[in-house]
Image: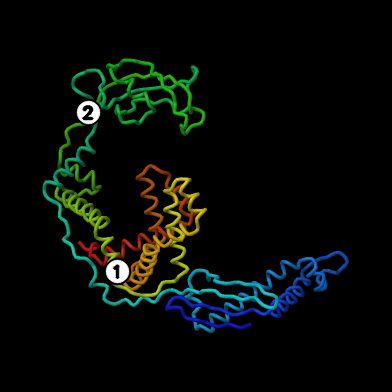
Amino acid sequence: MKVTVKKLDDANVLVSGTIEKSVIEANVNKLAIEGGKQMKVDGFRKGKVPPHVVKKLHGDKLVQDAESEALKSFMDEGIKEAGLNTADIIGEPTFKKYDKKDDNIEVELEVSTRPDVKLEGYEKVVPAFDKPEASEKEIEEKLTEIAGQNAPFVKIKRKRAVKDGDTTLIDFEGFIDGKAFDGGKAEKFTLTIGSGQFIPGFEEQIIGMKYEEEKTVTVTFPAEYQSKDLAGKEAEFKVLLHEIQEKEVAEINDELAQKILQKEDATVDTLKAQIKDQVENEKISKIYNAELKPKLIEALVAHFDFALPNNIVAQEIDAKVNEKARTMSEDEIKELKENPEKIEALRDEVKEDAENSVKATFIVDALAKKEEVNVEDQEVSQAIYYEAMMSGQDPQETIKYYQEKNLLPAVKMGMIEDKLFGKLLGLDKK
């Protein structure tokens, strides 16, 4: 076995050479002997199957395994020759050549390693910015909004017919073919007309109803309705209107502050201080995502100069090409498949973005270690759980989906990135 090593740059090494036929044959014989000790074949005692019988029965598989074993030894020798630490090797080697000849196999493969990022001077490229502040007007407007959200509904003082936008208190019971169905009944239910809370057509038919009026509302469940027993079916709802309600004018006092903050000693001033922080954090978040984060990533990528692992860059190019393909028409995709040169042109088009993306990932990883920034797995789960709750999805099902699709590492990396950038920008200090 002949192995030569050529260093392409600080992150990539080319290992080339030949694997002689004699090496493969020796491996085949060894595997055949080992296999004979495990196999059971008619006419032979178990564990006593001769090598030539094993070869006859499993010749192709033995050759494949023998080549794989030889290739592993070839790679190990190349890694040793190159002086690489196996812990630094990243991703799978990329085959540049695997040419089987009569007397040997000519091999060329590229091994990539984790870049060595020299962390110097990065503090100087962090963009400066003025922290936004919440004005008194913004705080008062937010306080009034919160108070309104917490104000109770009360019966309107003058009886009238229901109008669009009213909040009503109703009883209802649903029937299909004259029979009541599960989940179709409620008493003293609060429904805002026009909210879209009920199936299409229901709320519109409540408009015009008067106090204590009973009415039959006829609707058809959507074909894609979540309950298959109800999907696409016509239903009648008997509805009784009790009253129209409106929110009381909210009184802003210490009692309201205590209710919202769940603290017995809370005051309006305490609540205002929290609202001030909330408004300012919202402003900072907007500036961070729209301006600061892109600027910081661009500055860090420009500041650092190091070799990138070619196999990881190739993976990122693949991902970006696939991303672009998802926006193409069937005709455009067909044209790409029929023209390899166009695929290469597309890969060249996204190459710089792919390199910058990979470079940024390694920079963030190195800086996070230096700045001692970490995100625990529990934090990732909590973040996904909260987002699912806020969007009305099942948190457990959402977490399960992320696990099955192996998306948790990417979420974690994103959280580490934001935590790191927040520290560099000073956003984690009040």
Question: How is the structure coloured here?
Answer: rainbow
Of 325 and 409, nearer the camera is 325
Q: Quadrant of the C terminus?
A: bottom left
Whole-percent x, y for residue 170 in the image: 33, 23
Q: Quadrant of the N terminus?
A: bottom right
- What secondary structure is found at the residue carrying circle 2? strand
Q: Are marks 1 and 2 in contact (CB under 8 Å)?
A: no
Instruction: From the image, state whether disc 1 or disc 2 is nearer to you.
Output: 1
Of 249 and 40, nearer the camera is 40
Whole-percent x, y for residue 120 in the image: 29, 77
Q: Residues within 10 Å of mark 1 (few under 14, many from 20)?
A: many
Question: Mark 1 sits on what residue?
Answer: 300
Question: Which residue lies at the image location 22% right of the left edge and 28% below the top edge?
Answer: 246
- What secondary structure is found at the residue carrying circle 1? helix
Of 379 and 264, nearer the camera is 379
Q: Amino acid at mark 2?
A: Glu
Q: Which mark is residue 345?
A: none
Q: For this view, does 303 lie left or right of residue 40? A: left
Question: Mark 2 sits on what residue?
Answer: 246
Q: For this view, does 78 lie left or right of residue 275? A: right
Question: Which quarter of the figure has residue 359?
Answer: bottom left
Q: Residues within 10 Å of mark 2 (few under 14, many from 20)?
A: some
Question: Which residue lies at the image location 78% right of the left edge and 71% below the top edge?
Answer: 36
Q: Amino acid at mark 1?
A: Leu
Question: Which quarter of the figure has residue 39?
Answer: bottom right
On screen, 148 above or below 377? above
Whole-percent x, y for residue 177 in the image: 50, 18
